[in-house]
């Protein structure tokens, strides 16, 4: 299974009567840190920081484009249990370790989201939990009335 593959679901309410649903994955950090891969609250779906991790292995070591592309694909795949896809994405956040990688990461973003054009933030950070990771991404999606179950 990939990092963003759904491996568990939990449903409850947020106190306002809105549906709250969490989806997990096989990320090794979910249990250790205590987080879900994605959470649906009302019409919003938030996808946690996603690294270029597939079957426990970092993809594209040393290549920011491959890492970004992999991370975006994994994050978008986390929307599938909610019946959504890339067209529902309204916000992206990209965290990179080197400013020199802006072009490569931007190219991957454009290839995945170019026709969708979500709002986007790109931030240079000092590092990640695994020093081989150059890119981590987050996405937010919105369920339109026609996408509601």
Image: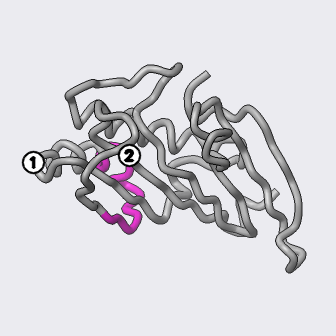
Estimate the spatial distance between the alpha carbons at disc 2 and disc 1, rounded to whole Å: 15 Å
What residue do we see at 69% from left, 35% from top?
6
**Image spot of residue 35 (x, y percent):** 65, 50
Residue contact at pointers 2 and 1, CB within 8 angstroms = no
Is residue 110 highlighted in magenta? Answer: yes
Query: In the figure, 92 relative to 29: above or below?
Result: below
Q: Give percent across and percent down for residue 91.
A: 45, 64
Q: Residue furthest front?
A: 32
Quadrant housing the N terminus: top right
Quick one: SS at disc 2? strand
Can you give x and y, in whole percent of width and height, for residue 36 in the image?
67, 48
Residue 33 placement (x, y as % from top left) = 61, 46
Q: Pointer 2: what residue?
A: 136
Count residues near mark 1 (Cα–Cα under 10 Å), then give few for <14, some for 14-19, many for 20+.
few
> What SS does tag 1 mark?
helix
Q: How is the image coloured?
A: one colour
When the figure is inspected, residue 14 is found, relative to residue 56, above or below; the finding is below
Given residues 108 and 93, the one toward you in this image is: 93
The crowding category of the residue bearing disc 2, from other C-alpha atoms within 10 Å (few below 14, some 14 to 19, many at least 20), is: many
In the rendered structure, the answer to whether residue 32 lies left or right of residue 17 reads left
Q: Residue at x 23, y 50 (%)?
A: 106
Circle 1 sits on which residue?
A: 100
Give the residue displayed 37% in from the left and 62% down from the top: 117
First to last magenta residue range: 109-121
Position of residue 138 in the picture relative to residue 20 (left or right): left
Looking at this rendering, what residue extends furthest in the left direction?
Answer: 100
- Name which of mark 2 and mark 1 comes first in the sequence: 1
Residue 124 part of the magenta-drawn span: no
Q: Residue at x 78, y 37 (%)?
A: 8
């Amino acid at each position: 299974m990939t990092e963003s593959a759904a491996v568990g679901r939990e449903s409850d309410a947020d106190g306002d009567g809105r549906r709250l649903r969490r989806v997990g994955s096989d990320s090794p950090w979910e249990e250790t840190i205590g987080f879900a891969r994605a959470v649906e609250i009302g019409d919003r779906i938030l996808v946690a920081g996603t690294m270029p991790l597939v079957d426990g292995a970092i993809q594209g070591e040393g290549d920011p484009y491959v890492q970004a592309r992999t991370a975006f694909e994994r994050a978008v795949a986390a929307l599938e249990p909610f019946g959504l896809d890339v067209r529902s994405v309204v916000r992206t956040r990209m965290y990179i370790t080197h400013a020199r990688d802006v072009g490569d990461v931007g190219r991957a973003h454009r290839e995945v989201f170019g026709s969708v054009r979500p709002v986007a933030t790109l931030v240079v950070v000092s590092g990640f939990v695994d020093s081989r990771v150059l890119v981590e991404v987050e996405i937010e999606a919105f369920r339109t009335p026609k996408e509601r179950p």
